[in-house]
Image (cartoon, rainbow, N blue to C red):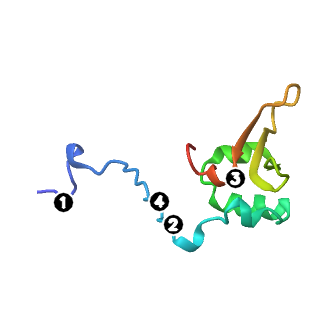
């Protein structure tokens, strides 16, 4: 008898997906109220650490700060502008605290 497996029992390619790592409490970004005075570059760098989807690499990222009616710090948004649509720029605005939802 041959020690070789028959054609019907040979191994096939298997794709293994690694489970997402659970976030630790310390990994959560600061709320907008505490991050308001941080430089844009720092906000974007910290955001990139949490973004998992490859689509973020197709965009230039900027920061938009919106104050409340009393002129106090309100919400911070990331503005994602497509790097490849130069004639008519295509952009998305996402609240900074919600970029991990829906991607």
Task: Measure how far apart labels 2 and 3 are at the Cα level.
Answer: 17 Å
Q: Pick the residue in front: 50 or 58.
A: 50
Which residue is labeled 2 in the image?
23
Which residue is labeled 3 in the image?
96
Give left or right: position of 44 versus 3: right
Q: Residue furthest left?
A: 1
Name which of mark 1 and mark 3 comes first in the sequence: 1
Residue at image location 32% in from the left, 48% down from the top: 12
Which residue is labeled 4 in the image?
20
Task: Measure how far apart labels 3 and 4 are at the Cα level.
Answer: 21 Å
Task: Measure how far apart labels 1 and 3 are at the Cα level.
Answer: 59 Å
Say which element carries label 1: loop
Give left or right: position of 1 versus 60: left
Task: Measure how far apart labels 1 and 2 are at the Cα level.
Answer: 47 Å
Give left or right: position of 31 versus 14: right
Q: Residue furthest right?
A: 87
């Amino acid at each position: 008898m041959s020690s070789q497996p028959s054609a019907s029992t040979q191994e096939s390619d298997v794709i293994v997906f690694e489970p997402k790592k659970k976030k630790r409490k310390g990994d959560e970004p600061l709320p907008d109220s505490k991050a308001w005075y941080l430089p844009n570059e720092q906000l974007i760098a910290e955001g990139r650490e949490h973004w998992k989807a490859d689509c973020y690499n197709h965009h230039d990222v900027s920061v938009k700060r919106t104050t409340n009616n009393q002129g106090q710090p309100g919400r911070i948004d990331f503005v994602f502008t497509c790097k490849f649509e130069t004639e008519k720029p295509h952009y998305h605005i996402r609240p900074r605290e919600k970029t991990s939802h829906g991607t």
